[in-house]
Structure formats: structure tokens, C-alpha cells
Amino acid sequence: MYRFHPSVKWTAGYPDRQQIVSQITQLWKRYGLQERTKFNTRVHSVRQDTYGRWTINNDTSFGHFDGVLAAVGTCGDPKMPRMPNQEAFKGEIFHSSKLDGKTAAGKKVIIVGGGASAVEALEFVVHTDAASTSVLARSDKWIIPRNVFVDILLALNIFGRETIFSWIPETLLKKFFYRDLEDLAPTSDGLFTETPMVNSDIFHQIRQHKAEWLRGDIISFTENGVRFRQRAKGIPKGGPGREIDVKADMMIMATGYERPSLAFLPDECFQGDYHPPNWYLQVFPPEHVSVCCNNCTYVNAIGTVSFPFLNQNPATLLDINQDTRPARPQEYWMKRWIDMTSHLKSRAPTRAFDFFTYAELIYWFVFCVAINPFRWKWAPFVFLGVGDALPKRVAGREERVRNGLGMKMKRFE
């Protein structure tokens, strides 16, 4: 569910859990989704029949469908690595996804990991009044403020990649956001190479001595915590450092998640140069444009890109399935857009679709929407989520005109 849905109303820029659950519940009831949802059903395959309709698990009793929206996300089963001498630790060990109902009040807490899960765990620990908190991170990652305007400016990188100008926003972040904690900023990885963490509170907690952020490697667990090799800034993983003992009563493993599988899709979606995330808009396999893997092929991005992007994809899928052929993307041109984007980002330190900014959306709008008048009618719906009735009527008239001229409609796939 996205904030761009016309009926979704937030009371803050970053809603809390209660607001999100409330809005989901309202939409669930409003659209009668309880009658359209089948729980406890594992999807092994989605395949097209001879008429181009999709069937689930080769079982027609589920119905026939014009499109498939895969929404399995990027976070599957929790990763729980086994640490050296882990059994010796006498305290509690939890994965960061299993903190509901737990409390860290009065406890010394170690958070293993330095990514977004670690930041979320740190917020949980601090707000439950832990005695002390130590975050053990193997590497430094960029942290940007939780400010929509700042995030939009960062995401408006027209090159869509790390460039010789990236030092400008990086320097500004160090001077005005990191300030006295500049030592925690990455030295080798640029801002536009990995997804930065979005948080405005973490530095405040460190400055207030409610938490400490340590860079280095875990040597082994001990009865009362962790034996840790603390590295200086710029020293790579596994490099030399000072060995210290970090005490803890509670250990939180912020070690991420396994990526959910997309193996239920047809094999041709994963062949050649056009495999995920190298798809049209990163989410549409060129061989099957009526499949949208929303937020399933994401690798890295920045700032606010995900907000309009996640809303735009299912809207585009509806557009594809309801419009006439001139407005529908063709496999050939979908692949050309992928090739063009890859070429424009060929000098990036990452692969073209491993890092997403607004640049890719601009390329798509200019070369796939603006130059095709048949797609203009869908722009308000795709970008703003409103006005779907008018383009449907226009599409119907276009189809009647085409049929009147002897141009019979063909199924897209």
C-alpha cells in the first residue's frame, strides 16, 4: 500500500506502525479484498495458456488472469549466521525481526550488523531504555537525514550513478549532517553505489552516549559478550585492529534476510542479457510485459525514488492490460530502453540497474511516454493514481476506430 493512493492520509511524513495498519485495514475493507484473497497457497508456477491468459500452478480452478503482479518483496527468511563460540554466550540472542514483545530495559545490548536492520534495532533498543548499546559493523554505510526535501535532491541525480560531482553532496553531508561524527562516513564507497540508510536520530543517540558505533570484525562470542577487533577508518574487512571485549546481556542479530525466490516465473524471464534486475523499469521482464515484479528485483536505490516508483509499476501494469496495441510496450522496444539505460550508465561503478535513481524514470518518461501520444492519456493515472476512467473510454474509442479500419486487435502476448 502506498501513500500515493488517493484515499491514503498520513498525519506525518513518516507514519508509524499504527497509522500504516489502520490505512491498510481501511483499504482492505473498502475493496472487499477478503473475498479476493486466498491464503495458505504456495505458488509454484505462473504460465500462459494458448490464449495468453495466466494460470496459477497449472490449475485452472484458481481462474484465468490477464496479468501477474508479483509482490514477494526482497526480505524473506531471516539470515541467522553462526558465530564462533556462539554457544558460550549466556544472554539472549534474537534476530532483529523477532523483537515484538521483547524489551531491552536495563540491559547491555550488542547489535550485530551495520545496515538498515541495525538502525531499526537501535531505535527499538534506545526507546526501551537499554543500559547501553553497541552496534558492531563490518563496514561503513552512508546515512542520510530523514528529510523528504533532502532525499529528493539526492535522488535527482540526472546521471543515475556515481560521478566526478558526487563529492559535492558527500561533502555537504559530512559537514552539515555527520559533523563531529565524520569518522563514520565511508571513504571508499560513494553515495550513489549502495542504498544509504535514512535516519535522523542515530547520530543524536551516539552524541548522547546512549549508543556507540564500532567498526571491525567479530573474533568470537564470549560468556558475557563479544571479542571484537576494532579497525580504524579506511582499514578493510578482516584487516588489523585493536582487540577489545564488548559486554552484553542481550544480542540482536541485524544480519538481514534471504531474498525471496522468483522461480515461479517462466524460464525465459531469466535468460540472456535481460535477466533481473535488467528488466524494463527494473520490474517488467521484456518477454512478458503483463508480469510486474514490484519491489522484487530491487538491489540499491536512494532517497524517495521507491515511493513513486512502487506506485507507478502496478499502475503501468493496469495501463498495459487495458489499452490498445499502440500504447503497449513491445518486447523489442523494451529491450532497447534497457540497452539505452545500460549504455548511459556504463561508466558507473555498479551495474546499470544495481542502483536506481530518478534518472531511470526520466529516461523512461522521455523515451517511452512523452514521444508516444497514445500513452499521454494514462499519465495522470500512472504518476498520480487518479483519473483512470477517462483513458479507459479513450482506449475503447481507439479500439473501435482501429477495428473500423480493419486493424483487428491482437493479444499482446
Image (cartoon, rainbow, N blue to C red):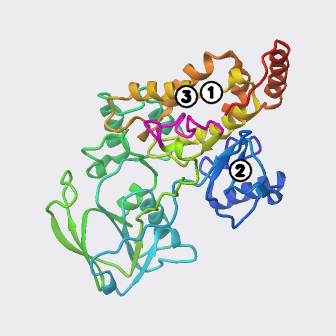
Name the spot of residue 47 as percent of width and height, x first. 65, 48
The kind of residue tagged 1 is Pro
Which is nearer the N-term, disc 1 or disc 2? Answer: 2
- Between label 2 and label 3, give the one nearer the viewer: 2
Using the rendered view, name the quadrant where residue 215 is placed. Answer: bottom left
Tell me the crowding category of disc 2: few under 14, some 14 to 19, or many 20 or more residues within 10 angstroms, Cα based. many
Mark in front: 1 vs 2: 2
Foreground pick, 326 / 406: 406
Q: Is mark 2 on a helix, strand or loop?
A: strand
- Of the pair 185 and 298, the residue shown nearer to us: 298
Q: Residue under circle 3?
A: 334
Residue 58 drawn above or below residue 337: below
Q: Position of residue 194 (x, y in %)?
A: 38, 45
Residue 337's label in the rendered image is none
Screen quadrant of the C terminus: top right
Q: Give the range drawn in magenta.
A: 271-290
> Left or right of 13: which side holds 49?
right
Query: Label 1 to label 2, Cα distance in Å?
Result: 22 Å
Main SS class of the magenta portion in the image: loop
**Residue 43 at x, y percent in the picture:** 64, 59
- Kindly identify which residue carries mark 1: 329
Q: How far apart are marks 1 and 3 (CA)?
A: 6 Å
Residue 290 visible to an observer of this rendering: yes
Q: What residue type is labelled 3?
A: Met
Residue pointed to by mark 2: 55
| Of callouts 1 and 3, the N-terminal one | 1
| Distance in Å between CA atoms under marks 2 and 3 | 24 Å
Out of 392 and 226, give the one closest to the viewer: 392
Vertical order, 218 against 170 (above or below): below
How many discs mark residues in the rendered view?
Answer: 3
Q: Does the magenta stretch include residue 280?
A: yes
